[in-house]
Image (cartoon, rainbow, N blue to C red):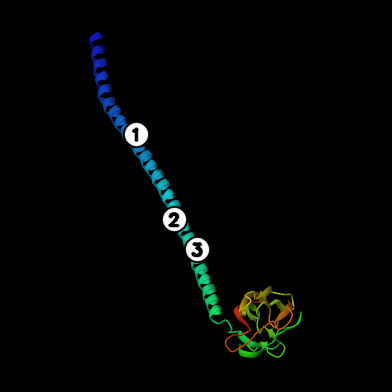
Amino acid sequence: MKMLVKIVLLVALCAFVNSTEPECSRFHYEEKTLEKMIKTEIYVDKIKSETEHMQQKMSEKMDGIQEDWKKTQLELKEANEDNEKAVEEIKNKVESLSTVQAVAFLAHNIKNKGPSDGETIVFSTTHFDVGSGYNNKNGTYTTPVAGIYMFTLQLCITGRRYIYFEIDTENGPILKGCFNDDSGSYDGCQTATTIAELGAKERVWIKSGSSSSGTDFWTQSTVWNSFSGVLISTVTK
């Protein structure tokens, strides 16, 4: 009886071992496979995340490059516009310089050789007058246009004589001076030059000041007592 029980238990144990061992091996394989699948999925997700992150950075970098390029294009456009504007301004200035109105005059042959203090010195001969500004009857020059003018006065003084003078305007003198000849034996010519900014239709004349008594100026064919002027540049007034 006892032997029979042992045989039955041995058979049952063998049956149990034979029946459960394969089941344990299959579960272990499936577990390992699932573990590998999970690890693979995690790895794939990681790669995907890194790829998306890299794509995002590249996209941001490209956006930055595009933004910089747009800014550069705008700056280039503005620089080109500024350059064109500067060129146009220079062109206009050159054109304005090249089209400055020609204005100039020269008068000589002094009318009164011994003018009194405060008298306008009149030069009776108009050598040329571009702009028709000099009046050789009253000795006054009238500017035809507003601008920067240069005026020159030459007076030939009798020996041992002197005379004070002004190049005068309605707004006051633009030059004051004195010519004198102290050589004793010789007469001499002296010159004075000045510049002034004047408006259109402003009058300019030579005013005599105090002088030595007697004839102060001398004239002959080889010398000129003269008054001249020229427009250097026009201005807007």
Badge 3, how many Cα within 10 Å: few under 14, some, many 20+?
few
Say whether disc 1 or disc 2 marks the residue closer to the N-terminus.
1
- Kind of residue indicated by mark 3: Leu
Q: What amino acid is at disc 1?
A: Glu
Q: Secondary structure at mark 2?
A: helix
**Residue 113 appears in the figure:** yes
Quadrant where the N terminus is found in the figure? top left
Towards the viewer: 150 or 189: 189
* Residue 113 drawn at (x, y percent): 70, 86
At 68% from the left and 73% from the top, the residue drawn is 177
Q: CA distance from mark 1 to mark 2?
A: 44 Å
Within-10-Å neighbours for mark 1: few <14, some 14–19, many 20+: few
Query: Residue 62, relative to residue 93: is it above or below?
Result: above
Q: Nearer the viewer, mark 1 or mark 2?
A: 2
Disc number placed over residue 46 in the picture, else none: none
Q: Is residue 96 left or right of residue 237?
A: left
| Label 1 – label 3 distance at C-alpha | 58 Å
Residue at image x 31%, y 32%? 32
Q: Which residue is mark 2?
A: 65
Quadrant in which residue 168 is drawn = bottom right
Q: Are marks 1 and 3 in contact (CB under 8 Å)?
A: no
**SS for callout 1:** helix
Q: Is residue 45 left or right of residue 236?
A: left
Q: Which mark is residue 35?
A: 1
Instruction: Check disc 3 and report the residue beneath it.
Output: 74
